[in-house]
Amino acid sequence: MSVFINISLQTITLIISIYILFQYEMSKKLLISLLIGSIILGYPLFLWQGIIGVFIMLLIWVVSLGFFRKKLFPSIVVPVVAVINLVISDYIVRAVFLMIKQPSIDYLQSDSYISMINIIICIVTLLLSFIVSYFLANFLKQDSFMRSYSMLFAILSIVTLVIFYINILIGKQSGFSDENIRANSVLFIFYFSILIGVCFLLTRMIVKETNMRNQQIQYERLTEYTENLEQMYTNMQKFRHDYINILLSMSEYIRAKNIEELEQYFNNNIMPISMNMKSNAYKLGSLHNLKIQELKGIISSKIIKAQELNIDANVEVVEPVEQINMDPVNLCRCVGIILDNAIEEAIHCEKPFVHVALIKRGGSNIIVVSNSSRPSTPELHKIYEKGFSTKGENRGLGLNNLREMVASCNNVTMDTQILHGKFTQVLDIAD
Amino acid sequence: MLEIFICEDNDEQRRQLTKYISDYILIENLDAEITISTAHSKEILDYVKANNVVGLYFLDVDLKEDKNGILIAAEIREYDNQGSIVFVTTHSELTYLTFTYKVEAMDYISKDQYTDIQNRVIECVDTAYQRYVKNTYKNRKLFQVKSGEKMISVDYNDILFFETALQPHKLILHTVNRQVEFYYKLKDVLSMDSRFYRCHNSFVVNKDNIAEVDIAKREIIMINGQKCFVSNRYLKGLKSVAVK
């Protein structure tokens, strides 16, 4: 009976530390069913396989978490880390206990000793989970880094656990001595802290690298924008060069009172210039009112891309926009997704257009993107479904991502509308 | 009667604009009249302040006074939040979206040589008139909430359901062609109309737009095929509504 209680206690501890490591973001239903299921399974597994049973348990957790939470990496790492926590706490508590006093062999085998130490182990595990969850949360937040290194970390954590257990099994075969436990605990703690240290450094490095890459991209976009401005400037100069000539020739017609030819000349030579002024290069003009470099970069580069695709694209920034109350990286990602979607949809239209506007309205800044859409565009709720895309499988994370990003900011609201062949997305960011 | 206001400081253009509109009212025999046609925005503002108006306003953006058309529009909006505002401007660098979203302008007429101004004016009068008729005769009820600076108004008939977003107090309103987020409490939404029904802890559904209720899957299927959750304990109240 006491074995059953001890095993169940450890199982409950593990589940609760999984819950802690997930930052409490788990539905109550899942939590309770995991608790009950694991308690029922835990004891027979222990009787059947001994401590190796934990691996079977682990597999069940990973599969069920992966199934219900849809995200593979955290579902692997979190349970594994929880078990590592338990093993480490186990060793710490036993080592400390042995250091304090030297109990007799009989006492070590007694039920009361085992249950007492078990309770302490569980408490230490939970404490450790709180600490580790802090690191892990920081870790999981790094999106770009998760994509490239998540598998490495999953394998690393599994290997760590396997090494721990091999060590335990070898220790068990040769019989645990006090020395053995002490040596092992020092070894494990050492290993674990090195692992955490290395992970920490690695994360820092990768974050730095990502930042640098972002800056590089931003720099490229701004260069493109500058080139665009330069071209506009060259056009202006050309015009300045021409207009004296134009005036001279016009004055010649006027002096000769040749109104008919003047009219012809005006229509053929001067009107086209005014049309030219409306050309693409000038449509980015109002971006100078936008003082946020990152945003300016992404909007100009997307608009230029759209213009290259023969889309009627323009930007309106009537009042100076100096600050937008949103993390610049998130803001640029949101705007990037919106513009990409707008361009992709607009290409397919007969009269394609993409209009962007940044507007100050009361206490908030709003970003409006409006684009032409086909009559065949699917209904709004389908577009927002996870995994939906007009381009086939596995590409439609854009809008869903956008919604998640917006949901994580409590001063940002979104308004999406399809009406009369026009798709409009409004991002309202309160100051 | 739909009241029409014109504010344009170029006499010639104002005369033309007035003529286009009065001719059209006459020909189509519309229940509308030009209340004020002026060069000074103050006249219009005074009238709007003194009377309860839902009007159609043609405003020049660049007036020869210290206020520009956009500011005037914003002031008009304070007293007439359902009226239709149309900007008339020589600015050909398109600022259409800015007009639309800053003061919820209805339209924008460019005074350059490429535009058939008369035609565009008539279009605007038509749209505003239809809006006006719809509002008065059909007694169309609008769901209106103010969230921050944003005024959201949606026809009650178009509302499918409300859903709570992840952030506290943020709701998502779903209609067939719009999804809009705003700050409000689900409980307060529920009490706004008898059509609304609390079907889940985080959903309020418009009973009129339910196509069917799938009891086995605990889902409500709306008229556009969109799904909305229903929880066990609220299922009972729905049985009387639309179980098929």
Image (cartoon, rainbow, N blue to C red):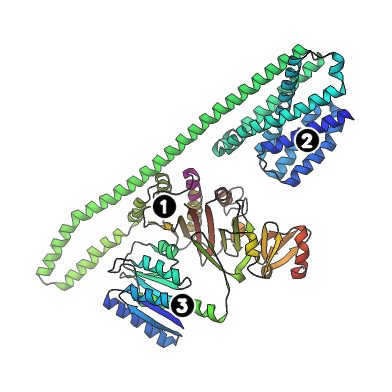
Q: Foreground: B174 or A361?
A: A361
Residue at horizontal 68%, vertical 17%? Answer: A187
In the image, is B118 to the left or to the right of B218? left
Residue A56 appears anywhere in the view: no
In the image, is B42 to the left or to the right of A404? left
Please provide percent x and percent y for residue A152: 62, 30
Task: Please determine if labels 1 and 3 lie on a single subunit.
Answer: no
Q: Which residue is mark 2?
A: A12
Relative vertical location of residue A424 with respect to residue A169 in this rendering, above or below: below
Q: How many marks?
A: 3
Q: Foreground: A250 or A240?
A: A240
Magenta segment: does it hold A325? Answer: yes
Do the CB atoms of the residues marked 3 and 2 lie less than 8 Å apart?
no
Mark 3 Cα shell of 10 Å, populated few (<14), some (14-19), many (≥20): few
The residue type indicated by label 2 comes to Ile
Q: Which segment did they paint magenta?
A: A322-335
* Chain hosting mark 3: B
Quadrant of res A259: bottom left
Mark 1 Cα shell of 10 Å, populated few (<14), some (14-19), many (≥20): many
Residue at horizontal 58%, vertical 38%? Answer: A141
Q: Foreground: A151 or B31?
A: B31
The numbered dot on residue A303 is 1
The numbered dot on residue A143 is none
Q: Which residue is mark 3?
A: B52
The residue type indicated by label 1 comes to Ile
* Chain hosting mark 1: A
Please provide percent x and percent y for residue A118: 79, 26
* Chain hosting mark 2: A
Do the CB atoms of the residues marked 1 and 3 lie less than 8 Å apart?
no
Secondary element at tag 2: helix
